[in-house]
């Protein structure tokens, strides 16, 4: 039988397909089974059934499919079974089986004769299926059972409860039959005739129920990318995913409508969604239209006040809508639309005047309720949609204030931007009055909310808008705007401009008499001056401003200046004195209730520990900081984003790679677009483990809007990836591009230059080594010159970092590796240089230490120190296995085989662990890594590591050679070796 074909891959349905495949396997073995497949319209039932049918057909199963059709009250009896019999009749291979059951042929005659003797017909269909199943396994698929006529439901009941699924008597062979029947769960209202049948069938031992769940957001994202033949912006994809709510059909329709623009419900989809709505009574339709104006969810009392019906009429209409599964009752005496798109379709169907009138009604009802955050936000929305702009402005400002008090900056920003949009449209006399309600101050508030929400570029744009509207005659406000703009420009790495505006702010307002505005302007100027290398200026202003902050008793400004001084003064944040000052700043900021300054202190405490090699203490500070950010609603603000990155980096450095990857996955849904860099260390893990998609995952950081940390992550990943791929040209190009992108306006090279140079030098040294062996002197000279250029860059940066001082332990370790790679490039491997690199990474990055150990083993082997080489290779190998760093493991094992560094063992002893012995037996039987994993209940990657261990321990270059050696040395028997 021809099976349906699909143009997109099956996404997110492995669990459901596995359940159906299991039922089919049991049926093929003679254990007849039935699965009732439930799910909302469009969720993907047909696709799952089609895939299962395709698998069954490929395995030699006869697949028979019948469809129920919505024909209202005049449904044709036995329609799906008529379709099935018609398919059999059209295939001459089944002519003899049909001839043996002539009563079944009546189904093809229109049905009137067929129902004269229902029992004979039912037994005939059961007998037909039984005879077919004796020839080959049979899969019977009945789709859209919710539309089945009474006769079809009765016949299905007979087949499942009394006929074909029951075990044969007297020990006869079972029937090789499976039945899959689908129905729409959202169509089954309380009195639907299918409900009693389902309740009866699921109690049968051979019948099970399978719910096809909505797809997860990540699965809908994959589907959207698969069905669209051109790239869609990430914002468009996110909006489609949000609106589809896991429904595959809705997602595909929304994708198809992207060419038309707009954000409404596509007309074809709206028609589908409105069909059930239009089947309601007029009163129920009126209630749903009113509820649609309220939003996705509506309270019963609010709906009653808006719809203007008696309580009895309203309850009857609601019962009808709930029965048709258009509304769902919720907690707190509320009702919600079953799907957001259904609400959108009903809302779009309203007339413009009707819509505005109902919005006005809801606004008036909410105004009488008082002032919660939700009420203010709803009132603002309804007032705006009903064209009462003055009320909308007042409610938006009220909602913004509620959001600010609750620590919800993204929501605060949304309400403030709404207020700013409305400002010019509302007469001055109708605008809210009072301190802080002028347009410039509101714009500054919006910029602060944007910065706290992680929308750094939006914060800059808003502050520039405030600057355009401020009068310089108001010196204090003009200074506030400028130092706010300077702080926001620092957040987008526009350092020279930030310094310029902070300088203007200080020039606008005098230091005497002292004021809070001057103190904050000075504190911002200190930050900007340090970023452009004006450390002396920064130190002088910080000390002066600290004295003023203490005299004026401005504790949070004092805390901010203490942090700057802890960084600027001798030794900085890595010293005990510096950290003591940072702890004092944290306590002062906390006491003043200034969470952003407190978070700055916690970040600097954490990074100071990291720079000192005290990684566990760094983790402790990071956890405190991230928890504080969460409680303050500032998780997307700059310092928490930096802390997320640093937290993952510390986990990566400690070798806790699984934890690093898991934390990154947990963070991903809550990171703003500008915070994508925070998952950077998880990309380092992916690269080291050989994940194929790491370059694709990194590309947005390299090609999107400029973000300093994003470019740093991309430069590290892409430079190392090119080096691992053996492409020195690409590695050097990536390194140079990265350094250029990260160099500040004053020309100061980033500290990461040392790391990037070392990574590129690895590829250059590999190429130089190959050329030295091949004798191409001119090309070799070109690459040794490049190596010298790179190491000089590393030396310069390591000895004088971005802040003018020598780099700490991490920078020194990367310089040691760069020196060793340079020596390898210009003269060959030097064991002493690599020993220094191994030691330099002793208290830090275990993976980089293992990479240096591999190079040290190579150098020792060249020096004929086989024992030392074997010891270093074994240590590198242990680290690679522990971390799951498969590419490094392959290179170590290759060196062990080439240098014959495998440990010698006593005659008759096995070098393999018990688990490796199990893997060896399956290896000898020709199993793949995946098959080994399945048989031993371990992951395929784990099986791969065991296979690599076996090859290394036996000194084998291939799986076949490993089996031969194992047989020769008595580790497996002859029957296993030839199995």
Image (cartoon, rainbow, N blue to C red):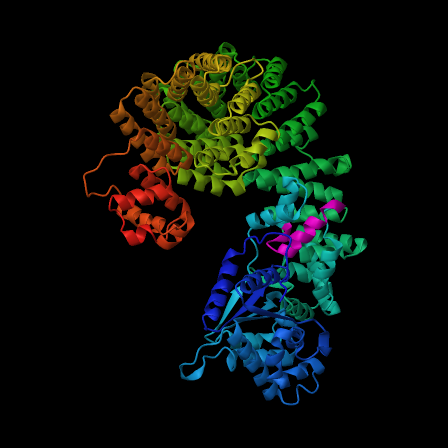
Q: Could you say where residue 589 lies in the image, as x and y percent from the top left?
A: 46, 28
Image check: 592 left or right of 856? right
What is the chief secondary structure element of the magenta stretch? Answer: helix
Quarter holding the C terminus is bottom left
Q: Residue at x 52, y 26 (%)?
A: 715
Can residue 751 be seen here?
A: no
Between 732 and 292, the one nearer to me in the picture: 732
Name the quadrant containing residue 495. top right
Q: Is 596 contained in the magenta span?
A: no
Q: Is 258 contained in the magenta span?
A: yes
Q: Could you say where residue 793 lies in the image, as x and y percent from the top left?
A: 48, 13
Q: Residue at x 25, y 41 (%)?
A: 911
Q: Residue at x 54, y 36 (%)?
A: 697
Image check: 605 left or right of 436? left
Can residue 649 be seen here?
A: yes
Between 781 and 341, the one nearer to me in the picture: 781
Q: Could you say where residue 282 lies in the image, as x and y percent from the top left?
A: 75, 68
Outermost residue, bottom side: 117
What range of the chain is rendered magenta?
A: 243-260
Image check: 9 left or right of 309? left
Quarter holding the N terminus is bottom right
Q: Could you say where residue 767 lies in the image, as x and y percent from the top left?
A: 47, 21
């Amino acid at each position: 039988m021809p099976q349906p074909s699909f143009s997109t891959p099956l996404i997110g349905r492995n669990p459901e397909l596995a359940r159906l495949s299991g039922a089919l396997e049991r049926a093929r073995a003679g254990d007849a089974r039935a699965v009732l497949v439930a799910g909302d319209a469009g969720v993907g039932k047909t696709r799952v059934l089609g895939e299962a049918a395709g698998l069954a057909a490929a395995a030699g199963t006869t697949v028979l499919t019948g469809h129920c059709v919505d024909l209202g009250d005049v449904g044709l009896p036995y329609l799906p079974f008529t379709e099935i019999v018609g398919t059999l009749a059209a295939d001459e291979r089944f002519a003899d089986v049909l001839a043996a059951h002539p009563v079944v042929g009546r189904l093809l005659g229109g049905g009137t004769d067929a129902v004269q003797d229902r029992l004979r017909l039912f037994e005939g269909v059961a007998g037909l299926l039984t005879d077919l199943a004796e020839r080959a396994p049979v899969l019977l698929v009945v789709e859209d059972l919710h539309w089945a006529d009474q006769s079809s439901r009765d016949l299905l009941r007979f087949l499942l409860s009394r006929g074909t699924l029951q075990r044969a008597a007297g020990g006869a062979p079972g029937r090789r039959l499976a039945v899959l029947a689908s129905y729409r769960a959202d169509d089954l209202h309380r009195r639907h005739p299918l409900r009693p049948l389902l309740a009866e069938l699921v109690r049968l031992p051979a019948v099970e129920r399978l719910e096809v769940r909505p797809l997860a957001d990540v699965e809908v994202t994959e589907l959207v990318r698969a069905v669209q033949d051109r790239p869609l912006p990430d914002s468009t994809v996110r909006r489609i995913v949000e609106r589809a709510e896991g429904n595959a059909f809705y997602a595909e329709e929304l994708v198809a409508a992207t060419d038309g623009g707009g954000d409404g419900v596509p007309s074809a989809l709206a028609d589908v969604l409105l069909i059930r709505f239009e089947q309601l009574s007029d009163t129920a339709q009126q209630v749903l239209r009113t509820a649609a104006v309220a939003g996705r969810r509506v309270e019963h009392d609010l709906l009653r006040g808006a719809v203007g019906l008696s309580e009895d009429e309203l309850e009857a209409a609601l019962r009808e809508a709930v029965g048709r599964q258009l509304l769902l009752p919720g907690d707190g005496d509320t009702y919600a639309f079953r799907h957001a798109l259904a609400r959108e379709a009903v809302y779009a169907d309203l007339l413009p005047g009707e819509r505005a009138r109902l919005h006005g009604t809801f606004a008036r009802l909410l105004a009488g309720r008082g002032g919660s955050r939700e009420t203010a936000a709803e009132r603002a929305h309804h007032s705006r949609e009903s064209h009462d702009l003055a009320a909308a402005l007042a409610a938006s400002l009220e909602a913004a204030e509620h959001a600010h008090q609750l620590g919800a900056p993204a929501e605060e920003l949304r309400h403030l931007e709404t207020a700013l949009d409305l400002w010019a449209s509302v007469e001055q006399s109708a605008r809210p009055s009072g301190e802080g309600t002028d347009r410039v101050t509101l714009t500054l508030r919006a910029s602060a909310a944007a910065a706290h929400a992680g929308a750094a570029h939006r914060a800059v744009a808003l502050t520039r808008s405030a600057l355009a509207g401020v009068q310089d005659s108001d010196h204090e406000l003009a200074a506030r705007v400028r130092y706010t703009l300077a702080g926001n420009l620092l957040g987008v790495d526009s350092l020279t401009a930030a310094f310029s505006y902070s300088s203007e702010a200080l020039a606008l307002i005098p230091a005497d008499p002292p004021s809070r505005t001057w103190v904050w302007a000075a504190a911002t100027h200190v930050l900007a001056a340090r970023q452009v290398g004006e450390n002396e200026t920064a130190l002088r202003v910080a000390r002066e401003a600290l004295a003023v902050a203490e005299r004026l008793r401005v504790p949070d400004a004092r805390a901010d200046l203490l942090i700057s001084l802890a960084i600027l003064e001798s030794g900085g944040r890595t010293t005990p004195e510096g950290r003591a000052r940072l702890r004092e700043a944290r306590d002062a900021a906390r006491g003043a209730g200034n969470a952003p300054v407190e978070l700055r202190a916690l970040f600097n405490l954490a990074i100071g520990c990291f720079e000192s090699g005290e990684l566990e203490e760094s983790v402790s500070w990071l956890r405190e900081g991230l928890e504080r950010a969460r409680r303050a609603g500032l998780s997307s603000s700059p310092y928490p984003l930096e802390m997320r990155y640093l937290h993952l980096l510390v986990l990566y450095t400690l070798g806790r790679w699984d934890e690093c990857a898991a934390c990154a996955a947990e963070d991903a849904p809550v990171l703003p677009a500008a915070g994508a860099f925070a998952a950077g260390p998880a990309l380092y893990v992916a690269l080291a483990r050989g994940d194929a998609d790491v370059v694709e995952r990194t590309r947005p950081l390299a090609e999107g809007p400029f973000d300093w940390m994003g470019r740093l992550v991309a430069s590290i990943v892409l430079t190392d990836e090119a080096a691992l791929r053996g492409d020195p040209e690409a590695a050097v190009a990536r390194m140079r591009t990265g350094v250029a992108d990260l160099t500040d306006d004053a020309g100061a090279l980033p500290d990461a230059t040392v790391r990037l140079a070392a990574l590129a030098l690895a590829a250059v040294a590999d190429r130089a080594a190959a050329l030295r062996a091949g004798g191409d002197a001119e090309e070799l000279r070109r690459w040794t010159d490049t190596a010298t250029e790179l190491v000089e860059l590393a030396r310069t940066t390591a000895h004088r970092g971005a802040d003018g001082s020598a780099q700490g332990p991490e920078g020194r370790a990367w310089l040691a590796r760069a020196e060793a790679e340079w020596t390898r490039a210009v003269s060959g491997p030097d064991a002493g240089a690599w020993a220094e690199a191994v030691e330099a990474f002793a208290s830090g990055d275990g993976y980089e230490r293992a990479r240096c150990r591999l190079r040290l083993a190579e150098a020792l082997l060249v020096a004929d120190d086989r024992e030392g080489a074997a010891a270093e290779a074994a240590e590198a190998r242990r680290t690679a296995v522990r971390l799951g760093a498969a590419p490094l493991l392959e290179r170590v094992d290759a060196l062990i085989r080439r240098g014959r560094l495998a440990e010698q063992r006593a005659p008759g002893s096995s070098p393999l662990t018990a688990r490796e012995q199990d893997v060896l037996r399956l290896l000898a039987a020709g199993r793949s890594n995946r098959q080994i994993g399945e048989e031993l209940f371990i992951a395929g990657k784990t099986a791969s590591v065991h296979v690599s261990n076996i090859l290394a321990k036996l000194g084998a270059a291939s799986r076949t050679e490993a089996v031969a050696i194992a047989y020769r040395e008595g580790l497996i028997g002859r029957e296993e070796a030839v199995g």
